[in-house]
Image: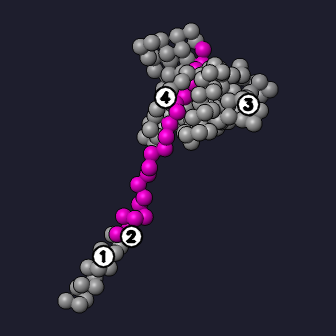
Amino acid sequence: MSAKKDDGRRLVAENRKARHEYFITDSYEAGIELKGTEVKSLRAGQANIGESYASFEDDGSFCLINAYIPEYQQAGRFFQHEPRRKRRLLLHKSELAKLFQAVERKGMTIVPLELYFNAKGRAKLKLALAEGKKLHDKRETAAKRDWNRQKARIMREKG
């Protein structure tokens, strides 16, 4: 999936599901604190952020949770990393304050959209403040459909 963008970015992973499930309001660019073998796996174009999310931890840090960066096959077993470990995200204090305020007061969600290398070769994560879309309740339509079937059956029996 490593495609080059016009601005010199090299896309590693994209969360397409996020744009479908959420209303995106603001986006931010965050740095990621990575270990050596994680960088090599990302450079090989291997990562998945589809099930990941960003969260504020109890110690005050801001972390990416449940992002999957597989082990780098050519590295020795002592140098490997945990594929789904928490990775600290790096943002300015003012941006962190805005994100924290939006999550606490407005109940918004912080969703990762893209994982990429910028023009300088640094790993970056595009985050978005999002509100959840109201999903259609299928139980209501199923109940209406069943009632219409029963009603038609009753009318046939009487008539």
Closer to viewer: mark 1 or mark 3: 3
Q: Secondary structure at mark 1?
A: helix
Q: Amino acid at mark 1?
A: Arg
Whichever of labels 1 and 3 marks the residue nearer the N terminus, that label is: 3
Identify the residue at the far right of this view.
78
Q: Secondary structure at mark 2?
A: helix
Q: Taking 93 as reference, is 20 left or right?
A: left
Label 4: which residue? Answer: 26
Whichever of labels 2 and 3 marks the residue nearer the N terminus, that label is: 3
Mark 4 vs mark 2, CA separation in Å? 38 Å
Residue 152 x/y as whole percent: 26, 79
Mark 1 vs mark 3, CA separation in Å? 56 Å
Q: Are marks 4 and 2 in contact (CB under 8 Å)?
A: no
Which residues lie in the magenta part? 122-144
Quadrant showing the C terminus: bottom left
Whichever of labels 4 and 3 marks the residue nearer the N terminus, that label is: 4
Q: Are marks 4 and 3 in contact (CB under 8 Å)?
A: no
Q: Is residue 101 magenta?
A: no
Q: Amino acid at mark 2?
A: Ala
Q: Amino acid at mark 4?
A: Asp
Q: Nearer the viewer, residue 104 or 128?
A: 104
Q: Secondary structure at mark 3?
A: loop
Is disc 1 surrounded by few (<14), some (14 to 19) or many (20+) residues within 10 Å? few
Q: Secondary structure at mark 4?
A: strand
Label 3: which residue? Answer: 60
Whichever of labels 1 and 4 marks the residue nearer the N terminus, that label is: 4
Label 2: which residue? Answer: 143
Residue 80 x/y as whole percent: 74, 27
Is disc 4 surrounded by few (<14), some (14 to 19) or many (20+) residues within 10 Å? few
Q: Are marks 2 and 1 in contact (CB under 8 Å)?
A: no
Mark 2 vs mark 1, CA separation in Å? 10 Å
Is disc 3 surrounded by few (<14), some (14 to 19) or many (20+) residues within 10 Å? few
